[in-house]
Amino acid sequence: MDWELWQRSWDQQQELYLPEREERFRVMMDVVAAAVGSEPLVLDLACGTGTISRRLFARMPRARSVAVDVDPTLLAIARGSFEGDSRITFVTADLADPRWMDCLLDEPFDAVLTATSLHWMKAEPVTRLYADLAKLIRPGGVFVNADHMPDPETPMLNAIDAAIQNSHQERARAEGALDWEQWWATVARDSGLAEEHAGSRAIFEQHSGGEEHPVAWHCLRLKEAGFLETGVAWQSINDAMVVAIR
Ligand SMILES: C[S@@+](CC[C@H](N)C(=O)[O-])C[C@H]1O[C@@H](n2cnc3c(N)ncnc32)[C@H](O)[C@@H]1O
């Protein structure tokens, strides 16, 4: 299996929706390095193909990562591409399950990092997750959540963002970028991932939808969960990186 090819095609597919994705990761790594130093123990939350851990190790080779996700296909790509790398361990868990932390060891994390993931969940499990993270992160540690965070009270700005997105996607598609459905169709055609794909499909079929919230909602929930300070490290009209200090 050519795991690097899968990594590249995943990145291209995600960039169709977020052309600033690499810049967002760069800022995330800046925040981690400044907040907790260059050898952190990181929880890569809803890791997908291990995107954040890859950027973390490229920037901080002595970092360690625990990568958690529920999706068998994305975890298979992650496990395949990190094979033999003792800095990372993988955990299969559903973050919406209140017992998701049972799979983790007791060691506190310096940083918990997540990107384009929590909008897959509803408000109540995200609120509970934030309380869990407050227990998992050491005092002075950091939580970073980069995600779609549109503000329903700015419809004109949201329309501008949609127009920007449309023209970017038109250009990217013309250059051959695959969208979400097309990418999963390529997974379905790969017999080497047949079992994992069946598992992913079962998860999608049971998924009852997620919710997007504005920056202020995330900051408030994080404060309520016990984080000392919250703020924004990067932002576009509908996407933001919220940072919280434990
Ligand atoms: C769009 S991907 C982003 C992955 C990666 N952070 C990136 O930026 O490429 C969203 C990820 O969230 C994961 N996810 C969504 N809901 C989840 C849940 N309840 N528990 C664990 N992982 C979840 C999905 O399986 C998927 O890997």
Image: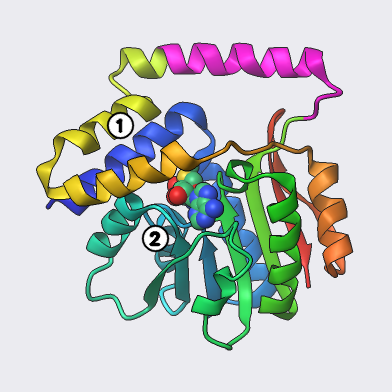
Side (left or right) of 32 relative to 132: left
Q: Is residue 38 visible?
A: no
| Amino acid at circle 2 | Arg
Q: Which residue is mark 2?
A: 54
Q: Which residue is mark 1?
A: 183
Circles 1, 2 touching at the beta carbon (< 8 Å): no
Mark 2: few/some/many CA within 10 Å (<14, 14-19, 20+): some
Give the vertical position of 129 relative to 213 (above or below). Answer: below
Identify the colour scheme used: rainbow
The residue at the point 34 percent across, 58 percent down is 75
The label nearer to you, 1 versus 2, is 1
Q: Is residue 156 visible?
A: yes
Q: Position of residue 205 (x, y in %)?
A: 43, 37
Give the vertical position of 143 relative to 12 (above or below). Answer: below
Q: Which residues are magenta?
A: 151-170
| Amino acid at circle 1 | Trp
Corner quadrant of residue 84: bottom left
Queried on whether the Cβ of the residue with tag 1 lies below 8 angstroms from ligand 1, the answer reads no
Q: Position of residue 232 (x, y in %)?
A: 77, 49
| Helix, strand or loop under label 1 | helix
| Residue 235: image tag | none
The residue at the point 74 percent across, 51 percent down is 124
